[in-house]
Image (cartoon, grey):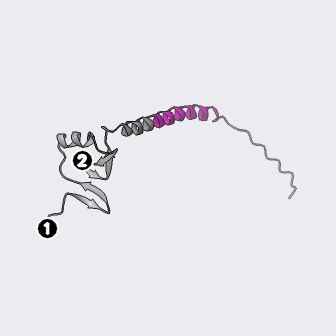
Amino acid sequence: MVDKPTSGEILGVPYNFERPSIGRMLSSYWKPGEGMLVEKPFGVGYTLNLANWRSWIVVLVAGALLYQQEASGSADETEDTQDDEPVEVIVDNDGDD
């Protein structure tokens, strides 16, 4: 039986399905001197290089957007509960057909 490769590239996208170790996981997220994106230690694609300052900007912006969404979501829920009052509808059918 032919062994399938556990790491490589498909259409320029890296993949790695080797069993991850703690050392490899930690070293793959902290690579000084490399770009903002580095190959994932396990799985398909790229991940953020936390040794690059641009990655921290991405993390902060994503956190701020998540906080803003959660804050506006709780405000929307309180407004919706106030609008859930019954509404009286009067239909006047005088036979104007």
What segment carries the magenta color?
Answer: 64-84
Residue beneath the point at 43% across and 38% down: 62
Local SS, label 2: loop
Point out the image quarter for the N terminus: bottom left
Q: Is residue 83 magenta?
A: yes
Residue 22 in which image quadrant: top left
Q: x, y percentage for residue 49?
A: 31, 42
Q: Could you say which disc has been placed on residue 41 in the image?
A: 2
Q: Compared with residue 20, is residue 76 higher up or lower down, i.e. above or below? A: above
Q: Nearer the viewer, mark 2 or mark 1?
A: 2
Q: Secondary structure at mark 1?
A: loop
Q: Position of residue 78 (x, y in %)?
A: 57, 31
Q: Nearer the viewer, residue 38 or 21?
A: 38
Identity of the residue drawn at 75% across and 42% down = 89
Q: Is residue 71 above or below residue 11?
A: above
Please name the amino acid that badge 1 sits on.
Val
Give the side of residue 30 with respect to residue 97, left or right: left
Amino acid bearing label 2: Pro
Taking depth in this image into account, of 81 and 33 the one nearest to the observer is: 33
Coordinates of residue 55 in the picture (x, y in percent): 37, 39
Dot 1 crowding, Cα within 10 Å, few <14, some 14–19, many 20+: few
Residue under circle 1?
2
Q: Residue at x 32, y 50 (%)?
A: 46
In this view, the residue farthest toward the bottom is 1
